C-alpha cells in the first residue's frame, strides 16, 4: 500500500471504531428505561410518572446523534490521523460513554432534591466534551496538520466558528445546573434541537 | 477525493452506523430473557411459564431483522445522503432502540391486566417508526433528490407502494392493542412473517 | 455502480452486520460473570465457587469465536447474497444471540439439580444453529447459486463435508444433556477445541 | 477476486470484528458506574464515595483505548491473516472482554479487605493479555510470515522491543497486587499514561 492508501485506511478504521462507540452508547441508553410496575401503580400510571426517564432518554439520544453527525462531518475534512488525534478522539469517546451513566442519574433524580447535582454532572460532562472537541479540531487544523488537501482555508474557518457554539451553550447549561437542574437539561435539549435545525437548513 | 467518492464514503458510514444500532438492538433483546428460577419453580417449569418473554423476543428479533433487511435494500437505491436524511434516519433508529424497551414491557405484562397498555406502546412505536420510514423514503425520492442515477422511475414507484403496507399493518395492530394486547402482538409477528415470505418470493 | 460492485457491497454489509452481532454477543457474555461477594464469603472463595460461570463463559466465548471464524471463512466462498440468504443468516444470528442467555442458565444451574435442563437448552440451541448453518450452505451451493466464480466444485464439497461435523457433535451433546449436563457442556467445549486445532492445522 | 484482494478483505474483516469487541467492551465499562443514592446518602456524597468506580473506569478505559490504538498500529504491519492468527487474536479479545468484569471487581473491592484479590485478577488478566499479544506478534513476524512486503526488518525489530514493555510492566503490577491492590492499579494506570505519552511523542 502506498502512503495515501494507508492513511485512508487508518482514518477509516478510527471512524469505524468511533461509530461503534457512538452506536453502542446510543443503544445502551435504552437500558435506562425501566418497567415502572411493581411499585403498586398500574403500567400506564407508572409510565407517565416515569416521564423524566423518557425526557432524559430523548435528550441524550438526540445529543449523541447530533454529535455523531458532526463527528461524521468533521472527518470529511480531517483526512489523516496521528496518535495524538487518536488519543484526543479517545478522550472524546470517554465523555460520550459517560453520558450513558449521566443520563441514568438525570432520569432518577430530576424530580428529587438533588436534581441539580445530576444536572451539573450531565452538563459538565458535555461541556468538557465540547472543549475536547474544539481541541481536537484546533489540533487538526493548526498548520493544516491533518486536513485534506482540497479543504479551503475558508471552510476550515467557518467550522472553527461553528464549533465555538457548543462549549458556550453547554457552559451556560453548566452555570444554570446548580440552581435549576431541569432548566439545564432543557437547555441541552434545545442545543440539540438548534444544531439539528441549523444543520438541516445550512445543508 | 472527488465529489462522488465522498458521497459514497458518507453513505457507507451512515449505513455502518445504522447497522451498528440494528445489530446492538437485536442483541440486547437477549437481555430481556431472564433466568426464571428462584421463584420456587423448577427451571423447566419456569422456562415454560416464561413463554411470553420468548414470544416477545422472537417477534422483536424477526421484526428488527426484517427492518434491517429493508433498510439495507433501501440504501441500494439511495446513494447520497444529506443532513436531513441523517436526522430522519436517526429518529428511525430512536424507535428501533425503543423497541428493546417495549419488548421487555410486552414480555412482562402480556399475561397481566395491563397487557393492552404494553401492546399499545409496542405497536404505537412500530407505527410511528413506519411513518418515519415512509417519510425518509418520500424525502429521498422527491425530485429524485438522493436516488442513484440508474434507479428507474418504475422501481421507485414499486417501492413506494410496498412501503405503504407497514404503517397500515402496524396501524391495525395499534387499533387492536387497547382491546386485545396479545392479538396485537400476533399481528406484528404476522407482519414480519409476511415480509419475510414475500421478500423471499419476490427475490 | 455496476451489478458486481453492488453485489459485493451488499455482501460486505451483511458480513458487517453479522460481525456486529457476533462481536456484541461475545462481549455481552462478560455480563454473566458476577461479583460473588456479599453472600458471606470472601472474594477469592467466591470466585473459586463461581467456576461454573467461568467455565460457561470460556465455552461460549470459544464457541462463538470459532463460529465467527467459520462464518468469516464461508463468506470467502459465498460472494453474492439474496433475501433468502439474509433471512437464513438472520435465524442463525438469533441462535447466536440466544447463546448469551443460555450461557447464563448454564452458569447458574450447572451445579444444581436442574443442570440437565440448562444443558439441554444450551446444546439444543447449538444443534439447531448447526442445522441452519448447513441449510445456509446448501442453499448457497445448490446449483452454485451464490458461490464465487472461482470456487471449485472440489472446494465446495470439502466444506460441505466439514460442516457435517457440527450437527453431529452438537446432536451428541444434546443426547447426553438430559442425563449429564456437565458432560454435555464438556462435549461442546471439546468441539470448539477440535475446530480450533483442526482449523489451525489445515490452514 | 485475486489472492491479494482476498487477503486484504480478510484482514479488514478481522480488524472490524476486533474493533467491534474493543468498542463494545469500552462502552460496557459505563455499566460499572452505578447510581449511589438510595443508601441513605445524598447524590453528591455518594458520587464522591464512589471514586473507586470512577478510578477503575478511567484506568480501564484508557488501558483498552491504548490497546486498541496499538492493535490498530500492529495491523499496519500485519497484512495477511491465517486461522492461527485469528485464534490468537480471539484469545486476546477474551482477555479484553474479561477486563470489563475485572473492572467491576476492582471498583467494588478496592476499599475493602480483599482489594488485593481483585487487583491480582485485574493485573493478572492484563499480564496474560500482554503475553498473548507478544505471541501474536512473534507468530506474525517469524520468517516474516504475515508482514507486509514493505515492512523493513528494522521496523519489525523496533516494535518487538516496544512490545516487551507491556508484560514487564503488567508483571510488576501482578507482583505488587497481593500486597497492595491500589498500588497495582496505579501502576496499570501509569502504564497507560506512559504509552499514551510516548506514543504521542514518538509519533
Image (spheres, coloured by chain):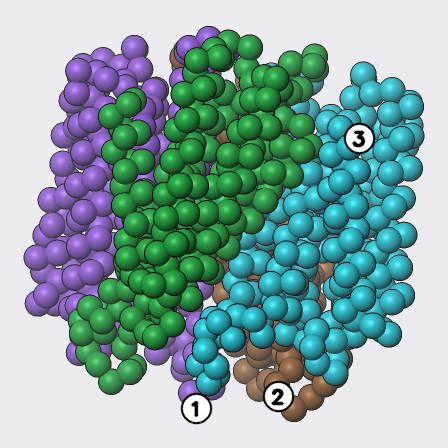
Chain colours: A brown, B cyan, C green, D purple
In the rendering, at what x and y percent does residue D55 appear?
31, 64
Going 41% across and 21% down the picture, which residue do you hit? C158
Closest to the camera, between mark 1 and mark 3, is 3
- Residue at which label 3 appears: B202
Closest to the camera, between mark 2 and mark 1, is 2
* Cα–Cα span, label 2 and label 1: 20 Å
In the rendering, at what x and y percent does residue A129 appear?
51, 53
Q: Is residue B98 left or right of residue D141?
A: right
Q: Chain of mark 2?
A: A
Point out which mark residue B157 bears.
Answer: none
Q: Is residue C51 left or right of residue D15?
A: left
Q: Secondary structure at mark 2?
A: loop
Q: Chain of mark 3?
A: B
Q: Nearer the viewer, residue C97 or A176?
A: C97
Going 32% across and 74% down the picture, which residue do you hit? C112
Closest to the camera, between mark 2 and mark 3, is 3
- Badge 2 local density, few (<14 within 10 Å), some, or many (20+)? few
Going 65% across and 62% down the picture, which residue do you hit? B55
- Residue at which label 2 appears: A39
Answer yes or no: is residue A140 visible: no
- Residue at which label 1 appears: D40
Answer yes or no: is residue C19 visible: yes
- Give the quarter of the figure containing the C terminus of chain D: top left
In the rendering, at what x and y percent does residue C65 appear?
37, 41
Q: Is residue A42 left or right of residue C43?
A: right
- Badge 3 local density, few (<14 within 10 Å), some, or many (20+)? few
Amino acid at each position: 500500500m502506498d502512503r495515501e492508501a494507508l492513511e485512508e485506511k487508518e482514518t477509516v478504521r478510527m471512524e469505524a471504531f468511533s461509530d461503534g462507540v457512538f452506536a453502542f452508547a446510543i443503544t445502551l441508553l435504552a437500558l435506562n428505561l425501566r418497567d415502572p410496575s411493581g411499585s403498586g401503580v398500574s403500567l400506564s400510571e407508572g409510565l407517565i410518572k416515569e416521564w423524566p426517564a423518557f425526557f432524559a432518554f430523548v435528550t441524550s439520544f438526540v445529543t449523541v446523534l447530533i454529535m455523531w453527525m458532526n463527528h461524521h462531518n468533521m472527518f470529511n475534512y480531517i483526512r489523516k490521523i496521528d496518535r495524538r488525534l487518536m488519543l484526543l478522539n479517545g478522550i472524546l469517546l470517554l465523555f460520550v460513554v459517560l453520558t450513558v451513566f449521566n443520563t441514568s442519574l438525570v432520569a432518577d433524580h430530576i424530580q428529587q432534591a438533588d436534581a441539580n447535582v445530576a444536572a451539573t454532572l450531565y452538563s459538565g460532562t458535555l461541556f468538557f466534551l465540547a472543549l475536547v472537541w474544539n481541541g481536537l479540531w484546533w489540533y487538526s487544523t493548526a498548520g493544516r496538520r491533518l486536513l485534506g488537501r482540497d479543504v479551503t482555508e475558508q471552510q476550515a474557518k467557518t467550522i472553527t466558528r461553528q464549533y465555538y457554539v457548543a462549549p458556550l451553550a453547554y457552559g451556560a447549561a453548566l452555570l444554570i445546573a446548580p440552581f435549576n437542574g431541569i432548566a439545564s437539561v432543557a437547555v441541552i435539549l434545545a442545543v440539540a434541537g438548534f444544531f439539528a435545525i441549523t444543520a438541516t437548513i445550512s445543508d
